[in-house]
Image (tube, coloured by chain):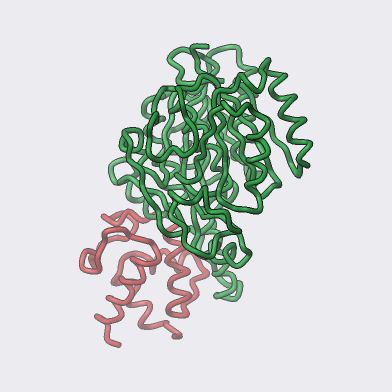
Chain colours: A red, B green
């Protein structure tokens, strides 16, 4: 799976896990901050994202500092998935 | 206690004026799902995307009342199961992911008090906030709580009082296997006459603004009585006492609103209670409109309030005998012969 495919797959998971009503994959920008941008995600969503990474990619984020460096935008998360996924 | 305002999201078009104007929706499956309004203009999308159906329709029914009645002293909700679908999703996750990391949203939305909490947050209401979860008497407990709250207040006070229940497909299948629902599909206009085992599954959110102030009131809730595991003679004795306590005779009741639901195993309770009253006493049913669920008596109060206002005369969905605009209404409901309730309402002009 190339980077573009991983990115689209992650965006699809994002829509499902966070139940982003009326949002399409195309509308989620790669470099837009997830928590301060148009998506308007909050702290509960960050927990949902951590669960998403665990369930779909086998990535466990246990360190909050590490989480803050990864859960910035789609690009940073996809980069981390490609490097660290176990499934 | 006086009803000042009310709203309902139900399997009929009660959220708009269509139901009152004579519309009667026919449901042909044994799950009577609600007609939900568009929430886009009233609930922020960031909140809406997380809400389960019970919370969503509860807030949908409550917000217009909060908008029209700003100074509410508290929120009292009755719900037997709360966000049932989210609860089951959460429990399934525990199994599917072998007790690993679980998502918070299903859990947060499944708690019965999620609705009262969310309404309080959205309306900045820091007053009394209680959710009652006593099975098929959850609404009655909420009603009793509201009556006691308002009774001890010296000044004019008001509360948001309501009930909510949602259909969960997963839970429906379990209850279906347990024989709670009919095997054959029954159209709701035939439900009351269908004497077979089980009933049909309904859902809904019903909200009221109740107050100890009679000004501009729509109806008055005079009294209520709850019974658990009664014998037939207990119901008669309690009913005698209930009417006597309120200075009424059987003949003084203009209208009985009965929770008959087509289940041959338990409808005998309603037939028995009806037999205590004179043949001339009007009696109507309401579960052909909304199906069976544990807080359906809240919808019966909604219906009674409409009837006391003089509405729903000659309505195609009102089954039974309704010969006049009632002044005094007695609601009798029971759930599988275990939890029973009596709610007495009167016209405010009396």
Residue placed most toward the observer, B24 or A30:
B24
Expressed as whole percent of the image width and height from the top left, the position of residue B279 reads 60, 29
The quarter of the rendered structure image containing the N terminus of chain A is bottom left
Residue sitting at the far bottom:
A1
Residue sitting at x 30%, y 69% = A74
A34 with respect to A26 (left or right): right
On screen, B25 above or below A27? above
In which quarter of the view is residue B332 placed? top right
x, y (%) of residue B116? 52, 40
Q: Is residue A1 left or right of residue B229?
A: left
Q: Quadrant of residue B268?
A: top right
Query: What is the quadrant of residue A44 in the picture?
Result: bottom left
- Residue B107, given in percent of the width and then of the height, sits at 54, 57
Q: Quadrant of the C terminus of chain A?
A: bottom left
Tell me if residue B311 can be seen. Answer: yes
Q: Position of residue B346 (x, y in %)?
A: 54, 20
Looking at the image, the residue that sits furthest to the front is: B279
Q: Is residue B290 above or below residue B177?
A: above
Q: Is residue B320 left or right of residue B12?
A: right
Residue nearer the viewer, A80 or B217: B217
For the question of whether residue B137 can be seen, the reply is no
Q: Nearer the viewer, residue B75 or B281?
A: B281
**Residue displayed at 32% across by 37% down:** B16
Point 61% across, 72% down: residue: B99
């Amino acid at each position: 799976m190339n980077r573009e495919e991983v990115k689209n797959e992650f965006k699809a998971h994002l829509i499902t896990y966070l139940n982003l009503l009326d949002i399409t994959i195309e509308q989620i920008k790669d470099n837009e901050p997830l928590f301060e941008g148009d998506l308007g995600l909050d702290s509960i969503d960050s927990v949902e994202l951590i669960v998403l990474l665990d369930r779909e990619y086998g990535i466990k984020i246990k360190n909050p500092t590490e989480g803050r460096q990864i859960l910035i935008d789609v690009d940073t998360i996809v980069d981390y998935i490609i490097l660290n996924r176990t499934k | 206690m006086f009803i000042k305002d009310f709203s309902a999201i139900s399997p009929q078009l009660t959220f708009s004026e269509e139901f009152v104007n004579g519309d009667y929706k026919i449901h042909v499956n044994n799950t009577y799902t609600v007609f939900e309004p568009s929430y886009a203009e009233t609930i922020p999308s960031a909140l809406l995307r997380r809400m389960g159906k019970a919370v969503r329709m509860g807030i949908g029914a409550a917000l217009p009342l909060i908008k029209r009645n700003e100074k509410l002293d508290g929120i009292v909700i009755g719900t037997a199961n709360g966000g049932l679908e989210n609860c089951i999703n959460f429990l399934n996750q525990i199994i599917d992911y072998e007790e690993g990391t679980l998502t918070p949203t299903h859990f947060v939305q499944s708690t019965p008090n999620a609705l009262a909490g969310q309404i309080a947050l959205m309306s900045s209401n820091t007053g009394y906030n209680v959710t009652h979860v006593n099975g098929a008497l959850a609404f009655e407990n909420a009603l009793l709580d509201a009556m006691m709250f308002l009774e001890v207040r010296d000044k004019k006070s008001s509360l948001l009082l309501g009930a909510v229940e949602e259909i969960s497909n997963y839970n429906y299948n379990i209850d279906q296997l347990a024989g709670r629902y009919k095997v054959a599909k029954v159209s709701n206009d035939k439900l009351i006459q269908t004497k077979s085992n089980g009933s049909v599954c309904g859902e809904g959110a019903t909200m009221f603004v109740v107050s100890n102030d009679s000004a501009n009131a729509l109806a008055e809730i005079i009294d209520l009585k709850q019974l658990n595991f009664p014998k037939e003679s207990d119901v008669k004795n309690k009913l005698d006492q209930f009417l006597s306590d309120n200075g009424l005779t059987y003949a003084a009741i203009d209208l009985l609103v009965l929770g008959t639901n087509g289940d041959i195993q338990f409808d005998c309770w309603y037939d028995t209670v009806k037999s205590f009253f004179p043949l001339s006493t009007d009696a109507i049913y309401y579960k052909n409109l909304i199906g069976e669920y544990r807080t359906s008596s809240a919808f019966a109060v909604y219906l009674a309030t409409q009837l006391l206002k003089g509405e729903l005369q000659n309505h195609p969905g009102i089954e039974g005998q309704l010969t006049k605009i009632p002044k005094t209404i007695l609601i009798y409901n029971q759930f599988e012969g275990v939890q029973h309730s009596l709610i007495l309402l009167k016209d405010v002009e009396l």
